[in-house]
Amino acid sequence: MAIKTGSVMGVAEETLSRNPASERMDLAFDGIRMTIFSNSASLLEKLKRYFDGFIVSGTGREGIRIYAIDGPAPEFPGESLTIKQPDPGKTRIKEEYIEFADGRVVRKRLTGMVFAFGPGLNLAVGPSLDNDNQVVNFINSRFIQAELSAGSLLAHAAGVAAGGRGLAVAGFSGMGKSTLALHLLGHGLDFISNDRLMVRREGNVAVMKGVAKLPRINPGTALNNEKLKAVMTPEDRDRFSSLGPDELWRLEHKYDVFIDDLYGKGRFTLAGVMSSLVILNWSRGVESFDARRVDPRERRDLLAAFMKSAGLFYLPDGDGSDTPPSEEQYLDVLERTDVYEITGGVDFDQATGVCLDILGGQ
């Protein structure tokens, strides 16, 4: 579908004129409403299953409007798409984009999905029914956009809470943030977020808000937790049980963990006071285990595990400055919380005990 336009609004108008969006779903993420319109009832059914705990009545005012269209992805003859360079440590080019005066268009290279967004406009179009996970991510990115525009900082961390006290779990790539968070859910804690937190200072405390994205786990995590085995089919359990720990660790296969199904209704919340932060800095194959409180101003090397770039799906407000937040801004938030580092060998049972002790001692 060739698009002849020089604006994000033009992309949306032409797409919606060809694909009327008569289906509707309303969500609420910590008080921020999202209204999803689609031309596909089947797509909305998938989204309703995913966002089950956040669906609200569709009557009354609309929230942030998002259009999710299943159909031919637009093409942009005559327009030059800029390649989004891979993040450090990565090699695959996944995205390319076009900057317009009224917003941005991002195209996913592998799936062909196209996302167009700007002030007051949010559109996902392409083979959405087959790539509903990317639609989920786009919906969540609109919540992140709203929170960052309101002054929050983006953090690469999971989050849990107990009795009004929240604990964030950060770690360098592949350290097991989600796995540790799920271990803590098994001890009665609530789930706040899987991989992204928006954090800010409010008075003398740090607060965190999560993203309504289900944790994704690999087969090794599922096999080593009786409750989590339920996410796997019997065939997968048999197939993966024959693999060794190192092979399981390297597998790219992932499963969504539906919190309400496994842990009970109302356990997935999106906000809390960030009383403490645990940073995982451990390694496989190491015998020792250590957890200690650290001063983030003296351990700035750990900030890289917590700070997160907003990425292509965030459009800065105001003068359009895309300058990322500074270490000082993150440190100002972290001064309102207790920060711990866990080093040595990977041991989720010991780490769970440490986290429970931290929360219980506050």
Image (cartoon, helix red, strand yellow):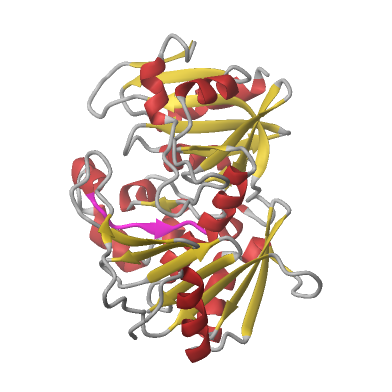
297 in the magenta segment: no
Front residue (pair 271, 236): 271
Task: Establish if 82 lies above or below 286.
Answer: below
The residue lying at 59 percent from left, 72 percent from top is 48
Task: Establish if 56 lies above or below 13.
Answer: above
Q: Is residue 22 left or right of residue 345?
A: right
Q: Is residue 153 left or right of residue 189?
A: left
Task: Give the residue furthest to the right.
Answer: 60
Q: Is residue 201 left or right of residue 185?
A: right
Residue 76 % position (x, y):
31, 76
Front residue (pair 260, 56): 56
257 in the magenta segment: yes
Front residue (pair 85, 318): 318
Q: Is residue 187 left or right of residue 77?
A: right
Residue 276 % position (x, y):
58, 24
The residue lying at 56 percent from left, 78 percent from top is 45
- Placement of the N terminus among the 4 image quadrants: bottom left
* Dominant SS in magenta: loop
Examine the image and state in which quarter residue 27 appears. Answer: bottom right
Range of residues picked out in magenta: 251-258
Residue 30 % position (x, y):
70, 51
Task: Establish if 336 lies above or below 113.
Answer: above
The residue lying at 63 percent from left, 19 percent from top is 336
Residue 15 % position (x, y):
47, 83
Examine the image and state in which quarter residue 361 appears. Answer: top right
Front residue (pair 101, 113): 101
Q: How many marks?
A: 0
The residue lying at 25 percent from left, 39 percent from top is 88
Query: Does residue 240 appear anywhere in the picture?
Result: yes
